[in-house]
Image (tube, rainbow, N blue to C red):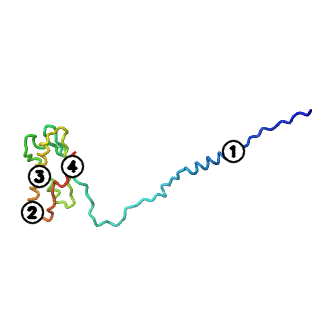
Amino acid sequence: MPPPELEEDSVDLTPMIDVVFLLLIFFMVTMRIVQEETELIVPLPSSVQSSEPPEFPPQNIDVEIAFGGQVVVDGLPKDTPLDRAMPQLTSYFLQQGQVAMNDPNAKVIINIKPETLARHKYTMNVLNALTKANKKLEEMQQGKARKDMFLLTQIMFH
């Protein structure tokens, strides 16, 4: 009897090639295309100047009211807590209002920040000082073109 022929073991590569092509197609489809910086369109400012005056940021006045009634404006203490009239605070507001009156684009924002347990009467004293400053500013504006300028235009409580 002749010796049996040995069968060659062969591996069918067709399924493996199919899987490789499927993976290749999957990665090509899900790949993000990144633009290079040279292709980015960046709007440049125009050389033509606009006729509008530049907008200035508003002037912020920070008024902090402590638990005991001490008023601190822009980091500087003003008046004593027992003084209800608050003349220093009123004159400071009046001074800031006069500066704002001279500049037609000026905007003043007053940020009132009372402590959590500060009494309401201390906040009212600050508002009364603002009202006094507004009345004096209104008297000073008699006969001037800009009569709509008030220091009380925007108040923010924090």
Mark 3 is on which residue type? Thr
Element type where label 1 sits in the image: helix
Query: How busy is the neighbourhood of tag 3: few (under 14 within 10 Å), some, or many (20 plus)?
Result: some
CB contact under 8 Å: marks 1 and 4? no
Real-space Cα separation, disc 3 to disc 4, in angstroms: 15 Å
Judging by the rendered image, the residue that carries numbered circle 4 is: 156
- At x 82%, y 37%, the residue is 7
The image position of residue 14, as x and y in percent, is 71, 46
With respect to residue 48, does 62 lie above or below? above
For the residues marked 1 and 4, what is the alpha-carbon distance in whole angstroms?
A: 72 Å
Question: Mark 1 belongs to which amino acid?
Answer: Pro
Determine the secondary structure under disc 2: loop
Q: Are marks 3 and 4 in contact (CB under 8 Å)?
A: no
Q: Are marks 3 and 2 in contact (CB under 8 Å)?
A: no
Residue 15 numbered tag: 1
Q: Classify residue 8 by image quadrant.
A: top right
Residue at coordinates 87% horizontally, 34% vertically from top-left? 4
For disc 3, the marked residue is 131
How far is the residue under mark 3 from the one under mark 1?
87 Å
Q: Which mark is residue 142?
A: 2
Give the residue type at disc 4. Answer: Met
Residue projecting furthest to the right: 1
The Cα atoms of the two marked residues, 1 and 2, are separated by 94 Å
Compared with residue 40, is residue 23 higher up or lower down, i.e. above or below?
Answer: above
Nearest the viewer among 8 and 150 is 8
Q: Disc 1 or 2, which lies upstream in sequence?
A: 1
User: Which label's residue is closer to the chain start, 3 or 2?
Assistant: 3
Q: Looking at numbered disc 2 in the image, what kind of residue is underneath it?
A: Gln
Label located before the other in sequence (2 or 4): 2
